[in-house]
Structures are given as structure tokens and as C-alpha cells.
Image (cartoon, rainbow, N blue to C red):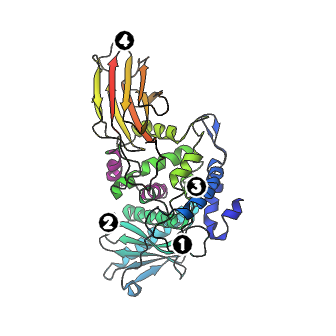
Amino acid sequence: MYLSLYEWHKQGVKSAAKSFPRRDVKGQTLTGALVVSGLLLVGLGERASWASSSGPAVETGEAPAGAGAWPRACSVRRAVCVHATPGTAPAITLAALDSAERALEVVTGALRAPSPDAAPDGAWHVYLVDAVDGGVRVLATDRDPRAYFDRASSLALVDRSTPPGCSLDLALARAVARGTLWRTSPAVDEGSALAQTEALARLSTTCSPWQDDAAAFQSRPERAVVDPVSPAFDRGASLFFGWLDATFGATPGTFLEGTWALSPTRTPPGAWRWAATPTPFDVLRVSLRDALWLGSTLEDVLARFAVDRASMAPPPRVAWRVPWPARARRLAAPEPVAPTGASFVRVDLAGAPPGARLHVQAEWEDYGRMRWIVAKLDASGRVLARIPAVALDRSTEAAITVENLEGTAQVLVAGVNVGSTEQEFDPDQGDWEPHGWLLTLGAE
């Protein structure tokens, strides 16, 4: 069954899925979960995608005008050529080619991802041009009409002002990773595509000049984790996909590549939009079932990420930071929370009497489903304990009393919007309904 789904036209992809060996997570075994559940989703996606094409717009690009006459340098080791805008210093062209070779060697070698689909001449082409937003952009050029599943070739536009060295290495790693995604799963929404390929690019290079991207993501934790508000936000969202890969992947990159391999789509010829399903979140929703404990779901994974996210650098913006509430306080959300987003409240325990207890009560708007977790933190910010505030299904309130606070410097209250009561999170929707909340804190 596996080979019937991934024959020669998907040849670079099947090794990624094969790389998921047995892995124990909190006593539960995640043995081939992505493979099995992903294959089920392929069938579901195949039936759904022929009936509905509401995914990202099908857009193709082409090489810059006159690029056929530009100076170029082609690798003798990898099927890649770099074309430079006239006037570009030859040293810059050669440096870009070196960076492209290194990126291809790591992404397709150590990380075992398929290479980007080449042009008809057998090479993948990179163009050094001016004024590329974000430094690099990868365009789909053609759909493969022979493939059973959606597949696209691509080319890369790289800003020729990118300094050689770390910055250029990262730019070409981003380009190769995005080219790989165009080949394996071109229907992925733009927000997820930027975040996932950024996570893979960062695995392929030691360069990490990305504090602005991480800050953009962490400064708006209430937004959906794949909200395409800006390229910087979505590159910063690689924190989420990198965390998934590190937490559930057997080896670096395999979880990312597995979600691509297991979300192929079939878009009708001539359609204006890619097929809508399956999305990366469809794969996650099924593949991460029971991943944390028996009966756990993607919602529990999102809640776990929210608490871990609070200790990442830079830390996420907190909605409220308050002292020990000797008298009860009621806090309102300064910004509503979109599906997959989170709000954070920190309570400093300085001044709390010995044996004190903290009562936490959360309320939120109808049609939203939220998970609330209380985490005890020590003085260094390390998580000492995580305690979920249990709520009934479709309820709009949850409460918990936190005891045994000795040795705790802060209490972190994280509220995660895990989706609507009406539908599951769809990254292609784009306009997600956020929900507000009220939090009551009181000493006991």
C-alpha cells in the first residue's frame, strides 16, 4: 500500500516517512503514527480535494526578463545554477553557488529531504536580483502533469545584497527548503509553508540571525501560529514547528518532512486554487493522537507548547503580570485569542504567606474552546509542575485551586484557544474568529 502511494514520481518523499522508528513519549508508543494516520488522510484528502479547491491560490512565476543572457555559474556536484543580475561581482555569484551547494547537501543528504524539482534542463535555478522582500522568495514555475499527486517545480530569487557567509547560507537554506516543499506538498498554506521551511532551514545551517523573526512571533502570542500577518511573524512561527520536530521526531527534520510527505493533494487541472485537504493540521490532528498520553489530542499538544513557549527566548508578551492577589482580582483579555493562539498571565508569589493557595477561575466567550493550564515556575523560570484546569466539553468556564506553592517563584496561567465549537482549525481560512476571556485570581 505504501509503495502504491509513493512510486517513482514521489521517490524522494518516501524515505522521509520511513524514518519514523519506534519512539516512546510519556509511556505511550508513537510507532509509525505519522505513516499510518497520514496514509489514512491521503485517502480522505483525495476524496475531498477533488470536490473542493479552496486552498491557496495556484500562482506560478518565471525567471526575470532577460535572465537567459545573464552571467551564471553552475555546480559540477549538484544540479543547481546561479544567475546574477548584470553588474554583480563574480565573487558574490560564486559565494551564492557555494551556499546553494551546502544547503542542498545538508537538506537532501543529512536531513534526507527530496531536492527541489529541477527545470527541464535538469538544473534548479537561483537568480540574484535586487529588492527581494525578506531576502529570498521561491516561486512555483510549473505543475507536473504526470504526477498522481500535486507537485511543482520552482526557482529561487535571492537578494544579491545579502552578505556572503552566515546570511547568504541561511537565505539559500530557506530557498532549498521551500523548493522541497513546492515539490512534495505545494498546496500547503503560505503561513505554514514559511514556518515549516524556516524550521528546516535552521536545522541545515548553524547560522541564527533571526531574533527579529522570533520577536515578531512572540510579541503576538494571541494570533494563530500560522497567521500570515507578515513574513517575519511566519518565519518566527518556526518556533512551533521546530518544537514539534524536536519533541516528536525521531531525528532532526523527520517530523517536518513526514507531515509534507503525508499531506499530498490532488488538484483538478486548470483549477485556480490548490486542493483544500489534507492540510498540515489534518496530519497533526490524527498523527499526534495519544502522543502525550493515552487519549491525548492535538489540543493537548497545543497546550503543552504554550507552556514551553513561555520559557523560549525571547519570551512571549504577557497579557498581565500581577503581584500576589491578597484581594481577589479580575483581569480581562487585552486582546482576544485566535485558534491555536495563547494568552499568558504571570503571578509573582513574593509576599504570599506560607501555606497560601491560589484560586484561578477562567471564563471565555461562546463558540470558542479553550484550555487553561497553570504552571509553577522556579526563580529561573523552569517549569516545576503543570496543572490543567479541567472544564466540561463545550463549557465556557474552568476553575482550579493551586496548592503546595513552596519553592515556587511565579505561577504562569496560560489560556490556549484550541478551536471553534463549530469546526476544526483550518489554516487556509485566514480570518479566524478570536475570543476574549476573563480571569479571576484570589488567595485562599
Q: Earlier in the sequence, mark 1 or mark 3?
A: 1
Estimate the spatial distance between the alpha carbons at disc 3 and disc 2, rounded to whole Å.
Answer: 29 Å
> Residue 117 at x, y = what percent?
54, 72
Estimate the spatial distance between the alpha carbons at disc 2 and disc 1, rounded to whole Å.
Answer: 23 Å
Disc 1 is placed on an element classified as loop
Residue 212 among those drawn in magenta = yes
Q: Which corner quadrant of the image does residue 174 belong to?
A: bottom left
> Residue 405 at x, y = what percent?
41, 18
Q: Which corner quadrant of the image does residue 442 belong to?
A: top left
Disc 3 is placed on an element classified as helix
Residue under label 1 = 117
Residue under label 4 = 354
Q: Residues within 10 Å of mark 4 (few under 14, many from 20)?
A: few
Q: Earlier in the sequence, mark 1 or mark 4?
A: 1
Q: Are marks 3 and 2 in contact (CB under 8 Å)?
A: no
Q: Which residues are magenta?
A: 194-218
> Residue 153 at x, y = what percent?
51, 73
Front in this rendered view, residue 202 or 188: 188
Q: Nearer the viewer, mark 3 or mark 4?
A: 3
Estimate the spatial distance between the alpha carbons at disc 1 and disc 4, rounded to whole Å.
Answer: 64 Å
Asked if residue 94 can be seen in this view, the reply is: yes
Front in this rendered view, residue 319 or 253: 319
Residue under label 2 = 133
Q: Earlier in the sequence, mark 3 or mark 2?
A: 2
Estimate the spatial distance between the alpha carbons at disc 3 and disc 4, rounded to whole Å.
Answer: 50 Å
Q: Does residue 188 sit above or below 399 in this rendering?
A: below
Residue under label 3 = 258
- Give the residue type that dot 4 points to: Pro
Q: Which corner quadrant of the image does residue 97 belong to?
A: bottom left
- Give the residue type that dot 2 points to: Asp
Q: Residue at x 72, y 59 (%)?
A: 1
What's the magenta bit mostly, secondary-structure-wise?
Answer: helix
